[in-house]
Image: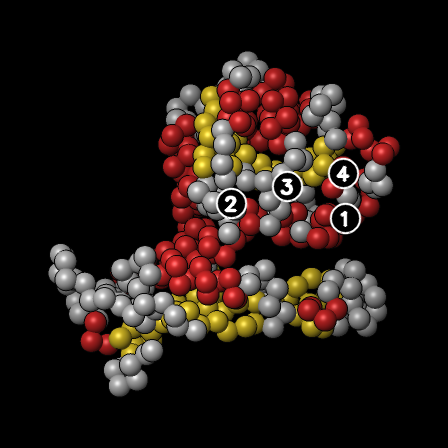
Amino acid sequence: MHELGIVFHIIRGVEEVGRKNRVKRVSAVTLQLGEVSGVVEHYLQDCWCWAADRSQLLKGAQLRVETIPAQTLCESCGEIYPTVAHGKTCPACGSAYTHLLQGSEMLIKEIEVPEETDIPPEPKGPGETPGPVCGRA
Amino acid sequence: MADTTSKVKVIEIKQSVFASNDEQARNLRGELKEKGVFLLNLMSSPGAGKTTTLKQTVKALEGQLRIGVMEADIDSDVDAKAMAATGVKAIQLHTGGMCHLDADMTRQGLEALGTEDVDLAILENVGNLVCPAEFDTGAVKNAMILSVPEGHDKPLKYPLMFSVCDVVLINKTDVMPYFDFDLEKCKEYLRMRNPNAEVIPICAKTGEGIEAWADWLRTQVNDWKS
């Protein structure tokens, strides 16, 4: 459920960029996901398949995910350590006063647009080209 | 399969997934400021006592603030019926299976509720400590209810929820003797994630602490309208 909401927001964000750039079709979207963003990539891909195919702009588009490693800073001793391995307790001094430096990101990094579809003034009407069906990895 | 012979153009975006929602939320807050409507986003896990607390809140603010309530749930309208029975304007929002409300859904809710005769609009978000914290609804302030049986360690387990809150109500204080809930520990854990959040212990069932909570709301609404 959580991933579906996020997918809807990715699609909304990409559609806005698409409108501004007068893009007709997007073939791939690259996301940067923090290791502790709470998003399960497998679920995200499932939701993406379902939701992207309902968007004219994103029909058949691939979702690529790049992972941003999570790092935590210890406010007591200044140690920077990997969050996933040690959680909120500093492995160097045992302090619980720590905060996440990076790893909770959910960023839309870039989109890929097939060049021939990047035609200016968009003619309204039917005649959509059918995109590939879902099944992309 | 991608056609490797066709050329592709890459458009760099580099924006948060939540960027468009955040913008819609800011716009909504701006409009609410102009209209003099205070929107409170109330969050908690299921069963923490959101609806019972709201019923007490309505009673405490009767004749002082005009209140409208939006009840967001995945299904059913039991909460909206319960609120309407108290005499306030209440509507039920169905999220269609979604685990949270975003700014756009909130705007639609406010339009359905009608805010022309409302000073304080309260959004009772979907019972969930994870997703609602990620989406700015456009509310002026965020409140969350943590109930005693849930345990005092929740600020450690759901840091984002506690870091976006302006006020935390600790509910069901009447059952404190039966649980290992340490209020001081809870406050300490909360301060680690959010040093600015206020803590108000309440018991929605008996009405204890509700006056302090109503005071907080009155002050916030007055500040927003001035």
Disc 1: CA contacts within 10 A as few (<14), some (14-19) or many (>=20): some
* B20 or B88: nearer the viewer: B88
Looking at the picture, do discs 2 and 1 lie on one chain?
yes
Going by the image, does B78 lie left or right of A82?
left
Residue A129 visible in the displayed image: yes
Calculate the distance from the C-alpha at mark 1 to the C-alpha at mark 4. Answer: 11 Å
Q: Quadrant of the C terminus of chain A?
A: bottom left
- Mark 1 and mark 3 on one chain: yes
Residue identified by numbered label 3: B45
Is the C-beta separation of discs 4 and 2 under 8 Å?
A: no
Task: First in sequence, mark 4 or 3: give its number.
Answer: 3
Q: Are marks 4 and 2 on the same chain?
A: yes
Mark 3 burial class by Cα count in 10 Å: few <14, some 14-19, many 20+: some
Protein chain holding label 2? B
Write the residue at 50% across / 73% down.
Answer: A66
Residue B167, horizontal then vertical, whole percent: 65, 38
Q: Amino acid at mark 3?
A: Ser
Which callout, 1 or 4, points to the residue nearer the camera?
Answer: 4
Circle 1 marks a residue in which chain?
B
SS of the residue under disc 4: helix
* Residue at x 58%, y 31% (from the top left corner): B220
Q: Please tell me the numbered disc located at residue B149.
A: 4
Instruction: Look at the picture and state if A67 lies above or below B169.
Output: below
The residue tagged 1 is B153
Q: Which residue is mark 2?
A: B100
Mark 2 or 1 closer to N-term?
A: 2
Kind of residue at disc 4: Pro
Residues at marks 1 and 3, CA–CA distance in whole angstroms:
14 Å
Q: Judge whether A78 appears above or below B74 on screen.
A: below
| Three-letter residue code for mark 1 | Asp
